[in-house]
């Protein structure tokens, strides 16, 4: 057996509706500008473009239902998308046979640091800093093809704070699911565990801290993503292995010491002054 220098990071897995087993994720491909109205709102001509893809990291997928506002940005946008999960792959897959590789479908949000992406676009640089950050792809469980078929039409709706932001029909996708798979497989070797994010319709806009995003797609249920829940005072949490009750919070803006320093101080006092931006895990 190969000896590893240290324990490897856990692989990302997605829950499957109606099954105990989980879906192990290999790669994450995201298609850009796949709805005409969205291409136009971003300043492009949808008739002139070949499909294009970028990637997120597998562990950017997050099924916690929480989206902590990411650092170094003040303009974070939601992009409501369908997730396509593959059970097999290959190269040069034909459009006709592409759907035989699909394991299932789910709901996802391609969260984007639009301000940072905009700077990269202007400079002709890669988009990772805008797209592939921690927890940048909140998603729901997968629905197997045996349960939901291959959704190619039906409503996609995203509300934020109860207001409709993105509303479209899956049949408005410029590049359909079989075409995306076939096109990708010309450039990459697709494999079981790969997921594809379908691209987003128009209506992308900024989210604020505390916003609740609710995405529904016909037949694929509902994904609700909120800001990390604030456990009430008195809730025990683990800080560096020590169990302490939360007795109060301070805003990160008021903290001048490093967070690890703050935790250390807190343990000594059995008192937690915790940044309001930090999610805590109840124990
Ligand atoms: Mn997108």
Image: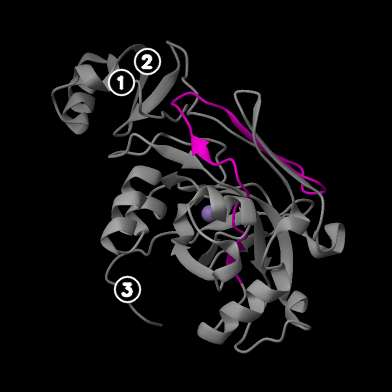
Q: Residue at x 26, y 22 (%)?
A: 252
Dot 1: element: strand
Q: Which residue is mark 2?
A: 246
Q: Residue at x 43, y 11 (%)?
A: 234
**Pick the front one: 59 or 169:** 169
Where disc 2 sits, the SS reads strand
Judge whether 126 appears above or below 161 on screen.
Answer: below
How many C-alpha atoms fall within 10 Å of the one at disc 1: few (<14), some, or many (≥20)? many
In this picture, residue 135 sits left or right of residue 179: left
Mark 3, mark 2: which one is toward the viewer? 2
Q: CA distance from mark 3 to mark 2?
A: 38 Å
In the rendered image, residue 66 lying in the magenta stretch gets the answer no
Numbered disc 3: secondary structure? loop
Above or below: residue 37 compared with residue 162: below
Q: Which mark is residue 274?
A: 1
Distance between mark 1 and mark 3 Cα atoms: 36 Å
Residue 153 image point, x, y percent: 81, 56
Q: Magenta span covers which residues?
A: 193-222
Residue occupying the point 30% across, 57% down:
122
């Amino acid at each position: 057996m190969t000896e590893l220098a240290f324990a490897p990071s856990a692989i990302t897995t997605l829950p499957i509706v109606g099954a105990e087993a989980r879906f192990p994720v290999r790669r994450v491909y995201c298609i850009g500008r796949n709805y005409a109205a969205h291409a136009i709102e971003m300043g492009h001509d949808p008739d002139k473009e070949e499909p294009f893809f970028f990637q997120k990291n597998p562990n950017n997928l997050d099924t916690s239902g929480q989206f902590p506002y990411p650092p170094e940005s003040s303009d974070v946008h939601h992009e409501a998308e369908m997730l396509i999960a593959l059970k097999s792959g290959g190269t040069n897959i034909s459009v006709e046979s592409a759907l035989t590789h699909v394991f299932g479908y789910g709901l996802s949000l391609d969260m984007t640091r639009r301000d940072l992406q905009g700077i990269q676009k202007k400079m002709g640089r890669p988009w990772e800093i805008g797209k592939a950050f921690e927890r940048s792809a909140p998603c729901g469980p997968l629905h197997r093809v045996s349960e939901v078929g291959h959704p190619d039409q039906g409503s996609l709706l995203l509300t934020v704070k109860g207001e409709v932001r993105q509303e479209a029909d899956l049949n408005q996708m410029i590049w359909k699911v079989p075409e995306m798979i076939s096109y990708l497989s010309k450039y990459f070797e697709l494999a079981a565990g790969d997921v594809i994010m379908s691209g987003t319709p128009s209506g992308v806009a900024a989210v604020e801290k505390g916003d609740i995003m609710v995405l529904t797609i016909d037949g694929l249920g509902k994904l609700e993503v909120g800001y990390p829940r604030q456990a009430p005072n008195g809730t025990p949490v683990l800080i560096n292995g020590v169990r302490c009750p939360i007795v109060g919070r301070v805003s990160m803006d008021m903290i001048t010491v490093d967070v690890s320093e703050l935790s250390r101080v807190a343990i000594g006092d059995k008192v937690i002054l915790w940044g309001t931006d930090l999610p805590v895990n109840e124990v």
